Image (spheres, rainbow, N blue to C red):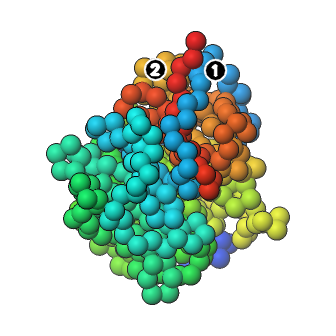
Amino acid sequence: MASSNLKIHRENEVAMALRIPAIKLLSSLLLLGGLSAPVGAYPVRPETVMSLQQGDHAQALPRARTEQRFQVVTLATGLEHPWGMAFLPDGTILVTERPGRLRRVTEQGLDPQPIAGVPEVFARGQGGLLDIALHPNYAENGWIYLSYAAPGPGGGGTRVARARLRERGLQDLEVIFDMERKTPAQQHFGSRLAFDKEGFLYISTGDRGERDRAQDLGDAAGKVLRLTDTGGIPPDNPFVGKAGALPEIFTYGHRNIQGMTRHPETGAIWTHEHGPQGGDEINILAPGVNYGWPLITHGREYSGEPVGQGLAAAPGLASPLLHWTPSIAPSGMAFYTGDVFPEWRGNLFVGALAGQHLARLVLQGDRVVAEERLLEGAVGRIRDVRQGPDGLLYLLTDAPNGSLLRLEPSS
């Protein structure tokens, strides 16, 4: 009894120091102490993330240097702020444009006619039509998933819908997630989509410029959500049955995740998110973990002042696996598993907006051990990076006249 009281006393001291309600930090500590809700067959445990992620600094990594020769081939131009892409079985590439258009790119180039049936979007600031993903069984059911900033009373918020592509455009549209609280803010919508090996859908949401929302388990902002393919709640989600918590929440304490992908071997979901001024992060997700924003960060306010208490780490909060300080503004994320670029197999690729490069991260297990910056200043702001079915890498550049690019081997 005495040791139990001492543990609670220390947890409360930590919570007071961070100026947050003690119950929020206590919930994270209890999750990490082995009292978490069931997590099914999810491949990473919270305690693994807490021990693995030590806030490694990307700029301190050794610089890798590729021997792989490649060339950049332009497949389409004239895309207005393209954001996400998906590859159809017939070779067509679907590309979202932030103002609210869905486009086809074929061997003949960009189809001048946008696809009909796209839902109305909140196309302001960073908002609009954002990510796209195919159902894992797309060949059988035809479902396409779209994330977007949606209008509603009070402003806009992240929404996810699914539809089927027919001859006349998108049909059978179903909304499977809608952020209840809409606000006029025009930033931090998150909106990356990824499926795990079990077919569950992960959705990132930004903090909408109101950072404390990321710590509120009764609010969907600043989270990663985990749903069934129809929008249902998996019964093993970590906050199912927790009073005051949304059952769709998988992880929390995120600022604005714009990169999310599944590790090809472990099946874990990896993400990256924007810091403020510095503190861009890569994280491996584990159920119920608090990734700390805005309580801890390696970044600073844009004024140069510390964020909150100026803490980069704290008990019960996950430090990043890797951080970029200063920021590169990461967007888009893909593991390379193909045979076309054998030297790159197993590497993680991250697009950079402000950095205007493609980061190639070399891994040993789950640790990043080296970085190379490809295409520095050569193609502009890279919004998305994906591996295509052909084993080549595809990029989207963020601009009023954006491009779809492909990396191919060169002799």
Label 2 and label 1: CA atoms lie apart by: 14 Å
Seen at 39% across and 39% down, the residue is 106
> Residue 197's x, y, as percent?
29, 43
Rendered-image quadrant of the N terminus: bottom left
Whether residue 161 is visible to the viewer of this picture, yes or no, is no
* Residue 246 visible in image: yes
Q: Nearer the viewer, residue 74 or 180?
A: 74
Name the mark nearer the viewer: 2 or 1: 2
From the top left corner, tell me how far across and down residue 338 is, in percent.
Answer: 42, 25
Q: Residue flagged by tag 2: what amino acid is it?
A: Val
- Name the residue furthest left: 140
Upstream in sequence: badge 2 or badge 1 = 1
- Work out whether residue 292 or residue 398 is closer to the camera in this orientation and state it: 398
- Vertical placement of residue 411 versus 396, above or below: above
* 153 or 372, nearer to the observer: 153
Classify residue 178 by image quadrant. Answer: bottom left
203 w.r.t. 23: above or below: above
Task: Give residue 35's position: percent from left, percent from top.
Answer: 37, 60
Task: Return the residue found at the far top.
Answer: 411
Q: Is residue 243 left or right of residue 324?
A: left
Residue found at x 35% / y 41%: 92
Q: Residue at x 36, y 65 (%)?
A: 118
Mark 1 belongs to which amino acid? Thr
Query: Where's residue 87, x and y in %?
Result: 36, 41
**Number of other residues with Cα within 10 Å of mark 2, as a class: few under 14, some 14 to 19, many 20 or more:** some
Q: Please report the residue visible at 24 percent of the width from the left and 63 percent of the height from the top.
A: 171
- What residue does disc 1 label? 66
Question: What residue does disc 2 label?
Answer: 340
